[in-house]
Amino acid sequence: MSEAQINTVSEKVNLMGMSPSKMKAWFAEIGEQPFRATQVIKWVHQLGVSDFDEMSNISKGLKSKLKELAVIEAPEVLRQLDSVDGTRKFLIQVSGGNAIETVFIPDGERGTLCVSSQVGCSLDCSFCATGKQGFNRDLTAAEIIGQVHIAAKSFGQLQVKGPRKITNVVLMGMGEPLLNFDNVVDAMHLMMEDNAYGISKRRVTLSTSGVVPALDRLSDYTDACLAISLHAPNDELRNKLVPINKKYPIAMLLASAKRYIEKLPDTHRKMTIEYTLIDHVNDRPEHAYELAELLRDVPVKINLIPFNPFNLSDYKKVSNNALNRFKDILMKEGYITTVRTTRGDDIDAACGQLAGSVNDKTRRSERYKADQPEPLRIIPFA
Ligand code: SAH
Ligand code: SF4
């Protein structure tokens, strides 16, 4: 049992974030049949029941045993903000007095939930508000899946009947998911589990800035979609924007990402390349041509993200001209290229503006330094 699954106040296990396989193992450990795990998962994630007494297909004896050993706790919503364009942002309290942000973005038939994986981030990318805050702590699996739970509940859609509101989940909120490997993977298993949220593996995306050793292991645990935060076509520029590049340069990162995609059971899947366009930094035509060359043998689609300005940054948003020119070059070079439109402007819900309330500046010392080992905490499954 990982520490993260123990409720520190009561010392009871929090079943909210337990993956299906871990839940089955836990029921076996306490001398119960594994099918009980499926029953509890359905109660928690599809019916929103957190009180064992309400679980009508569980015997009285087992209920008391569960009450003695476990709790079911989602994090608490501090605030819900609704934008005029339908975007919904949740400010969510997590233990330790911190808050994280989760954003739901509707787009026609599609509804994407952008989920956080850490409080702050240690990797300190030069254009990212989360990075500017430094790292505070990893979220538990319960806090990660809890964001999906909270959002689904807010739409009255835990038990999905008819069209879903949340069709896609992207791990593109606060934090670097591959630096919180085991909790992120557990939560992803619950997102994709039919008896929980049942979201297709083609609609759950993990986005990483390039923690290569963790990426190398990812295919042993999941076959979800992969997005690589590239942002530059060469190491010289990427070193300035994404400091972890000094340790795991572009060639190493793309090779690892390619191996991940090639291991997926279904062919024709592509990784997404995220490229945040910053005015006069990485938005020139020569950057677009260099990017096209770099990605020639990699199965990709490219998502251009206009940089979202924030207080602590001097970077400027890309001009419309430069954005369109960049996109046209990539398309002429044969790449599927989309532009992420900024949504939820009125509620500060845009990509890279998620800040929660991590105000502890002393944590800045925990930022990534290229000459130190990154704080990898990968706990393999038993
Ligand atoms: N740590 C992961 C996932 C979270 S960041 C990663 O870096 O991939 C999610 C995406 O938002 C990344 O592609 C990141 O580069 C982008 N992003 C961060 N700050 C941004 C900003 N100010 N404007 C636009 N995109 C930004
Ligand atoms: Fe961390 Fe991603 Fe922000 Fe970089 S872009 S600081 S990896 S959250």
Image: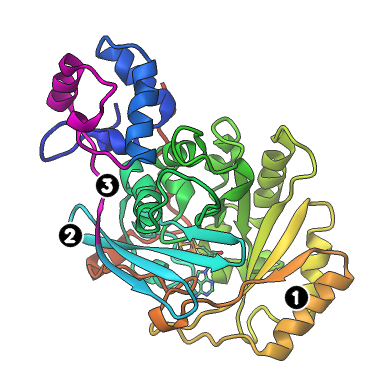
The segment highlighted magenta reads 48-77
The mark tally for this picture is: 3
Tell which residue pokes out farthest to the top in this image.
Answer: 31
* Disc nearer the start of the sequence (2/3): 3
| Residue corresponding to mark 3 | 74
| Image height of 324 relative to 295, above or below | below
Could one spot residue 170 in this view of the protein?
A: no
* Residue 319 sits in quarter: bottom right
* 309 lies above or below 1: below
Q: Distance between the residues labelled 2 and 3?
A: 15 Å
- Please give the label number shown on residue 287: 1
* Residue 324 x %, y %: 75, 83
Question: What is the distance, in whole Å, between disc 3 and disc 1 at their CAs?
Answer: 44 Å
In magenta segment, residue 67 = yes
- Asked whether residue 150 is in view, the answer is yes
Under circle 2, the secondary element is loop
